[in-house]
Image (spheres, grey):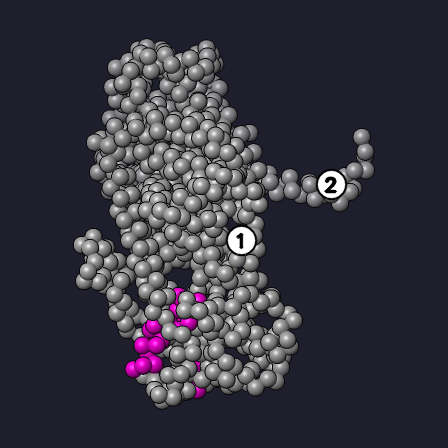
């Protein structure tokens, strides 16, 4: 053994990497595993709440339920997510939209494609798989490219999974908190149910009311609480297994699952809708990947979470095998007398942590959907200046609170809530399996046999659970269906309306040559100052600006067309975020600024956004005067009709500071070029903002369904969501809104 090997720099780096991984693994307990680890409170109780309780005297039934729980935990969270799904990250990000963004970026399978020529050289785009295309992958991509209806179906499937995850933000707090609080009836059996419901509502009210403070103030408590909770259920599991029935370990054999179905029959199949609750929160291991790392999540689950859950379920099953009359409160009745109240307190705290984790995840998912134009504009508050992922959405928070309280007060029973919960959980998992089928073929470039093997193993198991959950739709399972249908409709119609609006702008944009030729005939006057024209198009003149100068032939001495682009990548490096280009000849003083964001990037509400843009234009002019030696040029932007309208292609500014510290605009170091002087003088004269205030309507020849979607739903959402000027933080005193009707 080399005693001096630890002095090698590589040894220090490895040691630091190990410490970082273990630190992330510890932190993941409070965020990733909250929902998954509190399921022992209600799984057995919910499973034996139906007709299965008629067979409670049969030991094989209890052993069979334990066997099903064990193999479900082993196959879905351990094998599917830990082994396979975690490897399908999108530059370190996970979740349903991460899988979909991979498909959009690497093929024409999605409706969120942003593969414009100016984005192809992004480093995050270049980090995709370099495996050679297979015949199957080419055929699959060709099929989706040829049939637009298939791309629509794929987007609907993704939005369905996303809406079910948002539904978890309603069901998880209701189910977990009510289950924990109801345990007090073990010690106070005559306590009326209304007091339990009232206590659960008070806890939920406090939980949602504290959201605006952010989790960074109490987040350090999350991991210790969950670790203490896992230790509690592990020790209880070991104690109950030894105390009541050590032979319960035989139930880990799949033979007892076979015996269970043989004896329970149809009732056993229906009970799968409750057994699936043992994997609630399993999707969080992938969805929260961006905050941790694959290795840290794998270490935490395999070394601690998985063994603790297996021990907890074994201990509860051992207790039930000897105390079959305690099925309705099995978890709390299995706690020894002297440890009941400490465990009860820890269980309540653990359910609050789990609820907080799913609420924060819901905020993150909605923010991601909003960035990809699949959700109406809402106010996003960053509650921590150090941790980017900690956000708060007031409108969503209060809607979740009202719905959560309605579920608790309306059902008043964890069994009915569990029926709804199970359907939401398994739907999300099945959507992930379907997307993984496409990922395995088109991204990983594996054979069709490998993809079919993955789907046949995990998809068939999830379909079995899904079918059992559908059987419980009349008994509470309708809640996530109705909620997800509403959320899915809102997201799809918003995406459809937004995409049609952007398509209209792209098809009706004005060529820059035509704008310049119209100048003398319209008698256009150039007034002092800088005009920032916000538009979605990245080439040409937006129709709202053409409409403006036709009716009011005057605009500022310097015009900058600003386009904020959302790309299907998690993050755009700050050094690659800003593109500057010249529009038309130099004497026209027209520029284009394209600011690119990923769906996980924080969007500044531009307190100093105008300063940053103007500084970038000044840097562009400086670099242009020096011959472009410090910049990297991309392909020029042309119009669909053919002629190229940009005299200079978009230039990537290497020393970009668009997301950096606020600083005063100074041009003394940018050279003495005449254009730079004009820019400085125009800045002193004042800056005005212009954007469209459009009214959209379906054409007369449109179908009734399109008229309902555009004229009713989309128009209603546009009127009642945050305006684009508010979302961008544009001061009203300097805002010019151009009204225009878009027939879609």
The relative height of residue 494 versus residue 194 in the rendered view (above or below) is: below
- Residue at 21 percent across and 38 percent down: it is 410
Label 1 element class: loop
Place of residue 43 in the rendered image (x, y in percent of width and height, measured from the top left): 35, 26
Label 2 element class: helix
Q: Decide whether residue 549 is among the magenta residues.
A: yes
Q: CA distance from mark 1 to mark 2?
A: 33 Å
Residue 110 circle label: none
Place of residue 489 in the rendered image (x, y in percent of width and height, measured from the top left): 27, 49
Identify the residue position indicated by label 1 in the image. 125
Question: Which of the marked residues, 1 or 2, is nearer the chain's N terminus?
Answer: 2
Identify the residue position indicated by label 2 in the image. 11
CB of mark 1 within 8 Å of CB of mark 2?
no
Q: Decide: few, some or many residues near mark 2? Use Cα within 10 Å; few <14, some 14-19, many ≥20.
A: few
Q: Decide whether residue 429 is among the magenta residues.
A: no
Left or right of residue 47: residue 454: right
The answer to which of 108 and 478 lies nearer the viewer is 108
Place of residue 587 in the rendered image (x, y in percent of width and height, measured from the top left): 50, 84
Place of residue 72 in the rendered image (x, y in percent of width and height, measured from the top left): 42, 25
Q: Would residue 82 be visible to someone looking at this image?
A: no
The answer to which of 318 and 90 lies nearer the viewer is 90
- Residue at 31 percent across and 60 percent down: it is 500
Name the image quarter holding residue 664.
bottom right
The relative height of residue 183 versus residue 640 in the rendered view (above or below) is: above
Task: Name the quarter where the N terminus is drawn.
Answer: top right
Q: Which residues are magenta?
A: 528-551
Name the image quarter holding residue 279.
top left
The answer to which of 656 and 4 lies nearer the viewer is 656
- Residue at 73 percent across and 41 percent down: it is 11
């Amino acid at each position: 053994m080399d005693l001096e090997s630890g002095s090698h720099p590589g040894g220090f780096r490895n040691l630091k990497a190990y410490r970082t991984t273990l630190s992330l693994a510890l932190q993941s307990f409070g965020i990733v595993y909250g929902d998954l680890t509190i399921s022992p409170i209600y799984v057995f109780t919910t499973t034996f709440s139906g007709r299965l309780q008629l067979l409670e005297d049969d030991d094989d039934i209890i052993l069979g339920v334990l066997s099903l729980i064990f193999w479900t935990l082993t196959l879905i969270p351990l094998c599917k997510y830990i082994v396979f799904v975690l490897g399908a990250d999108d530059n370190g990000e996970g979740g349903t939209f991460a899988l979909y963004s991979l498909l959009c970026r690497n093929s024409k399978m999605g409706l969120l494609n942003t593969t414009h020529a100016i984005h192809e050289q992004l480093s995050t785009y270049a980090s995709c798989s370099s495996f050679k295309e297979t015949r199957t992958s080419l055929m699959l991509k060709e099929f989706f490219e040829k049939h637009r209806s298939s791309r629509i179906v794929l987007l609907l499937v993704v939005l369905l999974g996303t809406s079910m995850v948002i539904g978890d933000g309603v069901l998880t707090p209701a189910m977990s908190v009510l289950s924990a609080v109801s345990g007090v009836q073990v010690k106070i059996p005559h306590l009326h149910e209304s007091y339990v419901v009232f206590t659960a509502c008070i806890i939920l009210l406090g939980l949602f009311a504290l959201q605006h403070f952010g989790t960074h103030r109490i987040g350090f408590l999350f991991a210790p609480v969950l670790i203490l909770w896992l230790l509690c259920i592990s020790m209880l599991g070991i104690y109950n297994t030894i105390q009541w029935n050590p032979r319960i370990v035989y139930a880990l054999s799949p033979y007892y699952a076979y015996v269970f179905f043989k004896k329970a029959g149809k009732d056993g199949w229906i009970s799968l809708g409750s057994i699936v609750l043992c994997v609630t929160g399993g999707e969080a291991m992938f969805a929260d990947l961006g905050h941790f790392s694959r290795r840290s999540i794998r270490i935490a689950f395999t070394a601690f979470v998985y063994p603790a859950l297996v021990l907890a379920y074994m201990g509860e099953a051992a207790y039930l095998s000897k105390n079959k009359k305690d099925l309705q409160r099995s978890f709390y009745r299995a706690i020894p007398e002297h440890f009941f109240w400490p465990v009860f307190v820890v269980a309540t705290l653990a359910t609050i942590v789990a609820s907080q984790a799913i609420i924060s995840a819901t905020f993150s998912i909605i923010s991601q959907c909003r960035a990809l134009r699949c959700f109406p504009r809402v106010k996003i508050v960053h509650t921590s200046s150090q941790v980017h992922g900690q956000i708060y959405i007031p409108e969503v928070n209060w809607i979740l609170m009202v719905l959560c309280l309605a579920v608790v007060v309306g059902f008043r029973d964890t069994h009915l809530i569990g029926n709804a919960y199970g359907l939401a959980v398994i739907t999300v998992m099945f959507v992930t399996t379907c997307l993984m089928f496409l990922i395995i073929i088109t991204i990983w470039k594996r054979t069709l046999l490998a993809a079919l093997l993955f789907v046949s193993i995990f998809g068939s198991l999830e379909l079995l659970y899904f079918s059992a959950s559908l059987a419980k739709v009349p008994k509470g399972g309708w809640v996530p269906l109705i909620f997800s249908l509403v959320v899915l409709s809102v997201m799809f119609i918003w995406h459809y309306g937004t995409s049609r609006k952007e398509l209209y702008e792209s098809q009706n944009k004005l060529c820059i040559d035509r704008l310049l030729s119209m100048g003398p005939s319209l008698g256009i006057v150039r007034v002092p100052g800088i005009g920032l024209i916000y538009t979605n198009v990245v080439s040409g003149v937006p129709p709202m600006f053409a409409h403006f100068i036709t009716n009011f032939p005057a605009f500022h001495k310097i015009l900058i067309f600003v386009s904020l682009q959302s790309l299907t990548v998690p993050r755009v490096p700050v050094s690659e975020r800003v593109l500057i280009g010249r529009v038309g000849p130099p004497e026209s003083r027209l520029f284009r600024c394209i600011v690119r964001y990923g769906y996980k990037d924080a969007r500044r509400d531009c307190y100093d956004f105008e300063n940053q843009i103007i500084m970038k234009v000044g840097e562009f002019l400086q670099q242009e005067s020096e011959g472009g030696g410090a910049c990297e040029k991309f392909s020029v932007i042309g119009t669909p009709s053919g002629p190229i309208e940009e005299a200079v292609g978009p230039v990537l500014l290497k020393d970009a500071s668009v997301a950096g510290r606020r600083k005063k605009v100074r041009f003394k170091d940018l050279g003495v070029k005449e254009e730079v002087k004009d820019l400085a003088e125009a800045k002193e004269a004042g800056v005005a903002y212009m954007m469209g205030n459009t009214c959209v309507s379906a054409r007369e020849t449109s179908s009734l369904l399109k008229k309902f979607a555009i004229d009713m739903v989309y128009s209603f959402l546009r009127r009642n969501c945050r305006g684009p000027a508010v979302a961008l933080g544009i001061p009203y005193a300097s805002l010019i809104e151009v009204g225009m009707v878009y027939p879609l």
